[in-house]
Image (spheres, rainbow, N blue to C red):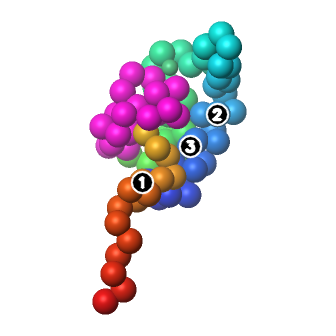
Amino acid sequence: MTRDQEIKLLGALESHITFTADPPRTDGCANDHRLTRAFLTREGLDVETELAGLVERGGRCCDCEVVFNAKLGAKSGFALPQDPD
Ligand SMILES: [Zn+2]
């Protein structure tokens, strides 16, 4: 999955799932990865491979964990800048 696709996935998930802080509540997550799977299928990606990667990055149980934990679009955000030499 490219960074652009990750950003699109994040947008797709956030358009279906709403989060409220007080009281802490998540609406629209069915406690599975159905929204993530639907997106990966739509994009023509290898669903099982991509989902396994997202799970490994913290999106363990469900779509909202993908939003919270997988750091979509920031895959290389923690990498040290490459020396141009
Ligand atoms: Zn969830």
Q: Would you place residue 76 above or below residue 24 in this image? A: below
Tell me the kind of residue under disc 3.
Leu
Q: Nearer the viewer, mark 1 or mark 2?
A: 1
Residue at far bottom of view: 85
Q: Which residues are magenta?
A: 47-69
Q: Secondary structure at mark 2?
A: helix
Horizontal side of 57 relative to 23 (left or right) equals left
Whichever of callouts 1 and 2 sits on the residue coming sooner in the sequence is 2
Q: Position of residue 42 (x, y in %)?
A: 55, 43
CA gap between label 1 and label 3 equals: 13 Å
Q: Position of residue 17 (x, y in %)?
A: 64, 25
All told, the count of numbered labels is: 3
Whichever of callouts 2 and 3 sits on the residue coming sooner in the sequence is 3
Horizontal side of 6 relative to 50 (left or right) equals right
Residue 27 shows in the view: no
Q: Residues within 10 Å of mark 1 (few under 14, many from 20)?
A: few
Q: Nearer the viewer, mark 1 or mark 3?
A: 1
Q: Nearer the viewer, mark 2 or mark 3?
A: 2
> What residue is shown with label 1?
75
The magenta stretch spans residue 50: yes
Q: Position of residue 54 (x, y in %)?
A: 38, 39
> What residue is shown with label 2?
14
- At horizontal 44% and vertical 35% (from top left) the residue drawn is 69
Horizontal side of 76 relative to 68 (left or right) equals left
CA gap between label 2 and label 3 equals: 8 Å
Tell me the kind of residue under disc 1.
Lys
Q: Secondary structure at mark 3?
A: helix
Tell me the kind of residue under disc 2.
Glu
Task: Name the dominant secondary structure of the magenta segment.
Answer: helix
- At horizontal 36% and vertical 27% (from top left) the residue drawn is 60
> What residue is shown with label 3?
9
The magenta stretch spans residue 20: no
